[in-house]
Every structure is written in structure tokens, then in C-alpha cells.
Amino acid sequence: MAGPNVQTPGVEMFNVIRDDNGNVTDLRMRTEWATFFASVGQVIYSGSRAGSTSALPTSDMLRWVGMQTFDVDEQSPAWLKTASTNTWIYPQIIGNDLILPNAQTYGIKVDEDTPVYPWHDLLGAISIRGVGASDPSYNVYRGGIRGYQFDAGEEVFIEFHLPHDYVSGSDLYIHFHWSFNGTNTAGVAAGTINGGTLTWGAECTYSKGHNQAAFAAPVTRTVDSTFTTDFPATTYQHIITETQLSAASPAASQLDSDNIEVDGMILCRAYLSATTITVDSGQVPDPFLHFVDIHYQSTGVGTKNKSPNFWT
């Protein structure tokens, strides 16, 4: 009977064919596998994981495939093992399950030519939990929809939790979702923007979870949007302004990426730092801040454990 399809990254699918006695009778696409392993210099261990040996065809094969012995009514997982390091090549497919090792260096990447971990968002909704002199105004944005409109110096507070698919040690990028509606915070119609700069700021402190560390002294990061003919301030246009929040060799205004891990938290004060916007006439419009998010790279899978050590 035919065993399950098995795939190793960068290689085409193949089938292991077994007869009713559980013996291997054919191995399709042998030439393709041999070519691949010759190109990467891998020598594959022959034999089963349990220590017994399956009957594998060896003619015209440069490399071998290990096969575990099962009763004929069970599914027959296949895998590959390097002779030099005696370690398994992942992923494995056993039954309907894709198996990855419980290690920080494994995950799902995108782009065949230059594989990278994909980006996800940590979402930061804008809300006011109390009453203060620096709160933004909750004004009409468009139609019956309201949002938080900011004068310089006004602020909101957001918490971010690092999820279990975060790529350990990778850099974080904080970004502001915002727009104008053609008014200032008093609701007065504004003139057409013809220049100037608007600056958002984020004051952030980070700590690992599970009683491992205290929240560190905050860092403050700002990012500018400068309006020109190439970057006009169109009314209701959704603008995203981003800056790198963490780095492996951080500036004084950044968090240290090497300290960031799963279940850590970032506490953030987001605020309108300054505006030097100019208009052709009349009032200067004030921005609405819709969301503050953090871009992070994701392994696409969670961790084995709920608490440190997350991967053992």
C-alpha cells in the first residue's frame, strides 16, 4: 500500500510504496532526491528510527531514505536523517500532522528565493481609561463615526503582549495609523496643507514575563511625516508612519531585541510630539490617531511550553 506524502523544504513530494507485508517495493522520484542531496552534500542514514532496517531499493540511488516499520493497517511515516550529525531533517509529516522540533530556529518562512519569517501585527487600540489634561478629544471623524483627534502633547496608553509565535531576538517596528478630516480639534474647517512636519512619539518600557525581570527605564522614539507635493496631506487618506522600536545593537531611543521574548510586555505612551504643518489659509488641521501597532516577525507556530524554557 502507499505510504503518506512527505516533503522536505526545497524538494518535490515523493511516495514510499509498501506491499501488504509492509516491505518497500518501490521508491519513486529516486533520481530527483539523489540530485538534491548531492547538491547540498547531505548523506542520509539508512534504516528505521526504531533500529530495524527496511528493504530499500538501492540501484541508481546516491542517497538512502529511512523507513519505519509498521503493521500494514497503520500509516507509514517516512523521514530523513543525516549520517554526519545523526539528526533528523524536518519537517516530518506523520499521518495528518506536520511535525517541527521544539526549537527557536524552526518555523514557517515565505519566499523560495530569500526565505524570511513573515510579518504579523501586535494590535494597539486607541482608548481613554480616565480623564486627564492630556487626553485627546473624541470628535466626529466622518458621518456618524468618531475618533481621537490630537493636539500636540496629547497622549494615550497602550499595552502590547509578545505572542508565542514571535521570532526570538528579531526586531520590532512600531507604526501609527492616522489621517486628517479637514478640521482642527475645535471642529473648525482647516485650510489646505502646503508643507510642514507632523511628529508622533512612543515612550516604551519592556519586561520579560514569568517573574524574570522588572520593567526597564523607558525609551522614547519619534517619527516624522513631512508634507510635500510628493506626499500631500489628502483629507481622509489613511497614513501609516513607522519607526524601528528595537534592535540588536540599540540606540538610546530603542529597546534591545536580544532581551525580547515570548510572553514579555511592552507598555507604551503614544502621543503627538509636535506639528509644524502650514496651510494656504485659515486653520491648521489636527490629526486623528486610529491605531498604534507593532510589526513583529512570526515563526507561524507557537512554543511547546507555556512558560520558560519555552522550547525544552
Image: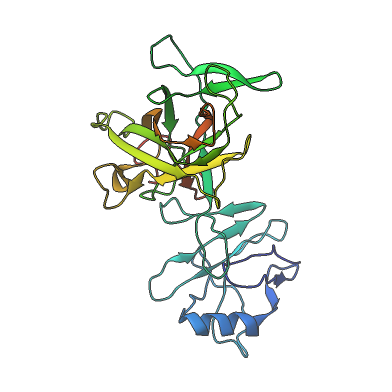
Q: In the drawing, does residue 52 fall left or right of residue 198?
A: right
Q: Nearer the viewer, residue 283 or 33?
A: 283
> What colouring does the structure picture have?
rainbow
Image spot of residue 101 (x, y percent): 47, 54
19 or 12, which is in the foreground?
Answer: 12
> Can residue 139 be seen here?
yes
The reply to whether residue 263 is visible in this rendering is no
Q: Furthest-front residue in view?
A: 281
Does 89 appear above or below 94? below
Farthest bottom residue in view: 60
Residue shown at 54%/36% (left/top)?
A: 280
* Residue, far top: 131
Q: Position of residue 213 (x, y in %)?
A: 25, 32
Q: Position of residue 263 (x, y in %)?
A: 40, 34
Viewed as shown, does residue 189 lie left or right of 84?
A: right
Residue 224's x, y, as percent?
41, 42
- How many numbered dots are placed on residues in this image? 0
At x 26%, y 47%, the residue is: 251
Q: Residue at x 55, y 50 (%)?
A: 229
> Does 283 sit above or below residue 223?
above
* Quadrant, the N terminus: bottom right
